[in-house]
Amino acid sequence: MTAATTTEEITTSVIEIVAEVLGADAAELSPGTDLRTVEGADSIKVLRIIARIEQRYDIELDDAEVFGVSTVEQVATVVAAAVGS
């Protein structure tokens, strides 16, 4: 992770991870996508998404923060705060 990582880059990364884990088309996901509405999303897969994000950015996210958000953009904001972007 570099200091040049922006919230926009993090958002793109979150979209890629969500698409991979849920088998969704990344082109159909946007920052405003509510993860609870993506086909195939369930609590186990959301945990996998969070684990991949944590691994990619070498961070540990607070469960209360993660489960208090629902859109890709909100997840990216939590990640950005954790990495200091």
Image: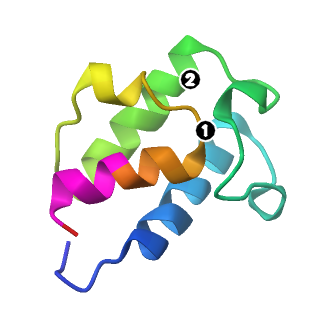
Q: Relative to 36, is 45 on the left or the right?
A: left
Rendering coords of residue 15 (x, y %): 60, 56
Residue found at x 75% / y 54%: 29
The image shows residue 85 at horizontal and vertical percentages of: 23, 70
Q: CA distance from mark 1 to mark 2?
A: 7 Å
Residue at 78% x, 28% y: name it. 37
Residue 66 picture quarter? top left
Residue at the disc numbered 2: 45
Q: Quadrant of residue 52?
A: top left
The local secondary structure at tag 1 comes to helix
The N terminus - image quarter: bottom left
Residue at horizontal 17 percent and vertical 46 percent from the top: 59
Q: Is residue 9 magenta?
A: no
The magenta segment is 78-84
Residue wearing tag 1: 21
Neighbor class of circle 2 (other Cα within 10 Å; few <14, some 14-19, many 20+) is some
